[in-house]
């Protein structure tokens, strides 16, 4: 008898260790990547409440359920318990044997846990495995507006970034500014402003965009150069440190008849246009500091009447001399 016990005891120890390891082995969900401990009964415990995981990039199941979404709800092993329900304007759904339950603002894993707890509490199922699938988002598209090539609503389901959304809209236009505003559908009162820089492309790939979000690409400001310059023009302000000299250079310089010392900057201050003198002659001579320009500024270079009269006299003299030269040939 004791001999048999000595042979059986090691097998019992091995079996007990294997059972213990199976009962405590964690599993990783395919959708969320969360590690959930499995108790000896085999039913996964509820994940921690409070929304999506704090780390990692959002996945399709991280998209919060919203009013108007169409959900497909089923219970594993109960083929008759399969219902398509739409979330009400109050954020609730109504299910047989469950009644009304609030799911708006929950991710699908949290909604599954909430429904399972109600079914088990009412003794309809024993440790049910509930599946919640979002068949239709109320706003399944991402709106891309503003200075993009093709503004519109684009279906960007799953984990997408700001760069994906801008690419779907054909990229930005030449008039696009340096900032993009993202309004998330579940945080309408907290828009997110992103600075676009070609050298900082990594920031665009790190900004997540979810279904229902609205992306607005700002329009770049414009600086105008008018008056006695060679090419009066409007210049897109894509440089935050744009100055008067740079604006004059973009207009191909001033004319010989320009009154350099009387140049003016017209700027909108408190809703009213205000004239600011610009000592352009001193700036060109490096005797005065260059003036930084803001969006919608107007640089005006007036004409010098004295220089114009002198110029006209000089032109008349040249024309007369040319005529004499031509006449003298004959």
Image (tube, rainbow, N blue to C red):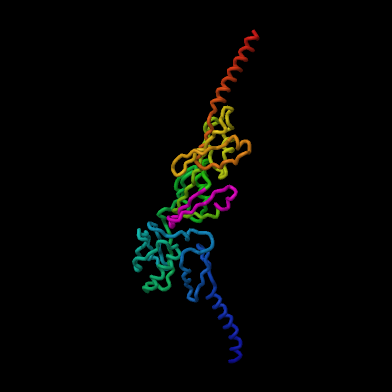
Image position of 55 with respect to 2: above or below: above
Image position of 253 with respect to 89: above or below: above
Q: Position of residue 62 (x, y in %)?
A: 48, 60
The residue lying toward the viewer, choosing from 77 and 92, is 92
Name of the residue lying farthest toward the bottom: 1
Q: Quadrant of residue 18?
A: bottom right
- Give the residue drawn at x 43%, y 72%: 127
- Give the residue drawn at x 54%, y 30%: 228
The residue lying toward the viewer, choosing from 187 and 94, is 187
Name of the residue lying farthest toward the top: 330
Is residue 119 shown in magenta? Answer: no
Image position of 286 with respect to 130: above or below: above
Is any atom of residue 76 visible in this view?
Answer: no
- Looking at the rendered structure, the number of numbered marks drawn on it comes to 0
Q: Quadrant of residue 1?
A: bottom right
Q: Position of residue 225 (x, y in %)?
A: 53, 35
Q: Position of residue 22 (x, y in %)?
A: 54, 75
* Magenta span of residues: 179-204
Image position of 132 with respect to 328: above or below: below
Q: Position of residue 144 (x, y in %)?
A: 47, 48
Is any atom of residue 193 visible in this view?
Answer: yes
The C terminus sits in image quarter:
top right
On screen, residue 195 versus residue 110, left or right, reads right
On screen, residue 205 versus residue 133, left or right, reads right
- Give the residue drawn at x 53%, y 46%: 178
């Amino acid at each position: 008898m004791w001999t048999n016990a000595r042979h059986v005891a090691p097998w019992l120890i091995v079996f007990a260790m294997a059972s213990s390891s199976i009962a405590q082995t964690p599993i990783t969900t395919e959708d969320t990547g969360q590690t959930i401990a499995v108790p000896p009964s085999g039913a996964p415990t509820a994940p921690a409440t409070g929304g999506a995981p704090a780390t990692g990039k959002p996945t399709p199941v991280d998209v919060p359920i919203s009013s108007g979404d169409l959900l497909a709800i089923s219970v594993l092993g109960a083929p008759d318990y399969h219902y398509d329900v739409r979330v009400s304007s109050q954020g609730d759904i109504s299910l047989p044997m469950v009644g009304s339950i609030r799911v708006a603002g929950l991710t699908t894993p949290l909604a599954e846990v909430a429904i399972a707890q109600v079914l088990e509490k009412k003794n309809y199922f024993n440790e049910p495995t509930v599946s919640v699938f979002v068949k239709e988002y109320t706003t399944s598209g991402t709106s891309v507006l503003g200075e993009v090539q093709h503004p519109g609503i684009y279906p960007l389901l799953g984990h997408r970034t700001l760069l994906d959304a801008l690419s779907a809209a054909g990229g930005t236009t030449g008039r696009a500014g340096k900032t993009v505003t993202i309004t998330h559908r579940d945080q309408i009162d907290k828009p997110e402003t992103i600075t676009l820089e070609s050298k900082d492309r990594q920031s665009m790939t790190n900004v997540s965009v979810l279904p229902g979000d609205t992306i607005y690409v700002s329009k770049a400001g414009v600086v105008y150069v008018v008056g006695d310059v060679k090419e009066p023009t409007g210049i897109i302000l894509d440089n935050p440190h744009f100055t008067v000299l740079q604006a004059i250079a973009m207009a191909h310089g001033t004319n010989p008849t320009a009154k350099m010392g009387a140049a003016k900057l017209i700027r909108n201050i408190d809703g009213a246009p205000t004239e600011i003198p610009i000592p352009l002659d001193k700036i060109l001579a490096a005797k005065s500091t260059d003036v930084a320009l803001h969006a919608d500024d107007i640089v005006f270079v007036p004409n010098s009447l004295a220089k114009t009269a002198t110029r006209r006299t000089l032109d008349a003299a040249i024309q007369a001399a040319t005529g004499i030269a031509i006449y003298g040939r004959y």
